[in-house]
Amino acid sequence: MLRTDMLSAMAQHLGYQKLKQTTILRTNSPQAHLDYDTSVQEHNTLMRSFFESGTKMHNLWISHYGQNQQNQSGEVQS
């Protein structure tokens, strides 16, 4: 709230008498919010990539394991 008070006082001093604090609050978005949102989006993208690559690795491992099981069962029957 102190930031809004400061911006309001600056606006009043500069002659913007009709500029209300509610307008300042509604339209003012600090850079920290944007930085945080960007950071969260970047984190989510990296986590998705990590889990997708883990899924691919898991599927490769399962298919390799299945092929080994088939090869071993074929050798036992021979």
Image: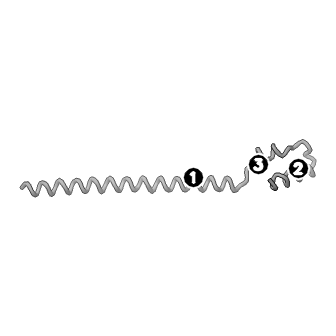
Residue matched to label 2: 11
Three-letter amino acid code at the position of disc 1? Gln
Q: In which quarter of the view is residue 68 placed?
A: bottom left
Image spot of residue 51 (x, y percent):
43, 54
Q: Which mark is residue 41?
A: 1
Dot 1 or dot 2: first in sequence order is: 2
The Cα atoms of the two marked residues, 1 and 2, are separated by 34 Å
Above or below residue 17? Residue 36 is below
Q: In which quarter of the view is residue 32 placed?
A: bottom right
Residue matched to label 3: 28
In this rendering, would 18 be left or right of 30?
A: right
**Total label count?**
3
Secondary structure found at label 1: helix
Image spot of residue 29 (x, y percent):
73, 50
The Cα atoms of the two marked residues, 2 and 3, are separated by 13 Å
Image spot of residue 41 (x, y percent):
57, 52
Three-letter amino acid code at the position of disc 2? Ala
Q: Residue at x 78, y 47 (%)?
A: 25
In this rendering, would 31 be left or right of 67?
A: right
Considering every residue shown, the one lying at the far left of the view is 78
Q: Residues within 10 Å of mark 2 (few under 14, many from 20)?
A: some
Image spot of residue 19 (x, y percent):
87, 44
Three-letter amino acid code at the position of disc 3? Asn
Q: In which quarter of the view is residue 40 placed?
A: bottom right
Q: Quadrant of the C terminus?
A: bottom left
In this rendering, would 25 be left or right of 68?
A: right
Q: Residue at x 42, y 52 (%)?
A: 52
Dot 1 or dot 3: first in sequence order is: 3
